[in-house]
Image (cartoon, rainbow, N blue to C red):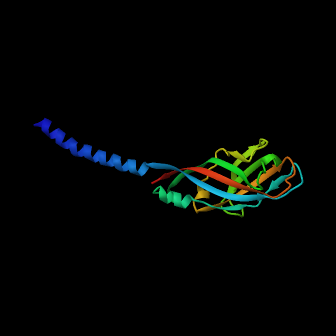
Amino acid sequence: MKTTRTPRLLLPLLVLLLLAGGACKKILSLVRFQVNDSSTFTIPAVGIIGTQLPLPGVPVTSTSVNTYQANNTQASRVQDVTLDELKLTIIDPPGQNFNALKNISIDIATDANGSNRVPLASLRNIPAGQTTISLTPAANTKLDIYLQNGSYALFATAELSQAVLQQTTLRAEARYNVSANN
């Protein structure tokens, strides 16, 4: 008789443990996805070589809020955001390349005033003849707050290796890796 009682007591305990384990798994589950944003900014014509040229903040309307919704999460559940890639492409004038730039760095901020501004990516010794360049993401930069509200600002600082003879328009394409609870 003792052998039939023990399995009957263990069965409800086993079911309870399985249900609790499944609930914990749901709470702790993370979704991983990417947010892709694009913006444009302009480098003015400048004739002074070797100059550090800081550019004003460029507002970026982020796809983050829509991307969070598409992945069944929201900004308050985001655990981690990191920059995966930042590419710059010259879009105007046609045929222009990055030969005039020696170095470039991009910072990110929560607004165009530069609040909470931190390094995002940079590239030193830009190769000649390129019309598109990929910047190196800044190490250990926590970006969660910048993608919370659906907008942020980018600030560029360029060091010139030669004169920029005409205004140049660049497109910045950023891809962020996001981990969030769903």
Q: Residue at x 78, y 48 (%)?
A: 97
Which residue is more in the foreground, 85 or 14?
85
The residue at the far right in this view is 48
Q: Residue at x 70, y 55 (%)?
A: 171
Q: Position of residue 138 (x, y in %)?
A: 68, 46
Q: Position of residue 9 (x, y in %)?
A: 19, 43
* Number of numbered tags placed on the structure image: 0
Picture quarter with the C terminus: bottom left
In the rendered view, does 101 fall on the left or right side of 178? right
In the rendered view, does 149 fall on the left or right side of 133? left
Q: Residue at x 33, y 48 (%)?
A: 20
Which residue is more in the foreground, 121 or 132?
132
Q: Is residue 93 visible?
A: yes
Picture quarter with the N terminus: top left
The residue at the far left in this view is 1
> Which quarter of the picture shows residue 111?
bottom right
Q: Residue at x 75, y 44 (%)?
A: 130
Q: Position of residue 35 (x, y in %)?
A: 57, 53
> Which quarter of the picture shows residue 128?
top right
The residue at the far top in this view is 3
Q: Is residue 102 visible?
A: no
Which residue is more in the foreground, 55 or 74?
55
Q: Position of residue 39 (x, y in %)?
A: 67, 58
